Image (cartoon, rainbow, N blue to C red):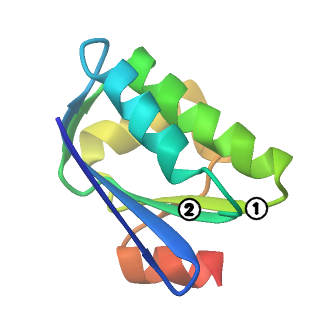
Amino acid sequence: MEITQKEENGIVSINIKGRLDADSSSEAEKVVKEALEGQTNRVLFDLGALEYLSSAGLRVLLSAAKEMRRREGKIVLCSLNEFVKEIFEVSGFQSLIPIADSVESGIEVLS
């Protein structure tokens, strides 16, 4: 798993590449928590390069969503492949976290 992040126009973008599973979720959780430090209230997860998502990975994303909700901020997931999108649909979590087809449409959701 590889995670990169950047901040642009008040939006923190987090890109996760590879597998987000039990082996990588603790590292991902640490990186996401660090990214959310401070006054951040708009977060975009670019998951276009995410190949696999387990329940442990889902918990990382749900934790970020709960933190944004607590802050009255916004969060969006972008560019999900069919496998990852299906996990959100089957689990019912797409009703908790907005999903956008592209990074551009995700930025519109956050604006």
Q: Is residue 52 above or below residue 103?
A: above
First-in-chain label (1 vs 2): 2
Which residue is pictured at 63% across the width and 76% down the height?
110
Contact between labelled residues 2 and 1, with CB atoms less than 8 Å apart: yes
Q: Residues within 10 Å of mark 2 (few under 14, many from 20)?
A: many
Query: Callout 1 environment at 10 Å: few (<14), some (14 to 19), or many (20+)?
Result: some
The C terminus lies in quadrant: bottom right
Q: Position of residue 51 (x, y in %)?
A: 17, 38
Q: Is residue 104 above or below residue 7?
A: below
Q: How many badges with numbers are in the image?
A: 2
Q: Is residue 53 left or right of residue 72?
A: left
Q: Residue at x 44, y 31 (%)?
A: 30
Q: Residue 32: x, y in percent?
A: 47, 42
Where in the figure is residue 95, as x and y percent of width and height? 68, 45
Q: State the SS at label 2.
A: strand
The structure residue drawn at horizontal position 55% and vertical position 60%, both measured from the top left corner, is 76
Tell me, yes or no, if residue 87 can be seen here. no
Residue 9 visible in the picture: yes
Q: Is residue 4 above or below residue 17?
A: below
Residue that mark 1 sits on? 73
> Residue 107 bears which disc, if any?
none
Of residues 32 and 20, the one drawn nearer to the viewer in this rendering: 32
Where is residue 66 shown, x and y percent of the image? 72, 38
User: Between 105 and 89, which is closer to the camera in this rendering?
Assistant: 105
* Residue name at image x 17 percent, y 35 percent: 1
What amino acid type is highlighted by mark number 2? Val
**Which residue position is annotated with label 2?**
43
Instruction: Give the quarter of the image for residue 57.
Output: top left
Q: Secondary structure at mark 1?
A: loop
Tell me the amino acid under the disc marked 1.
Answer: Gly
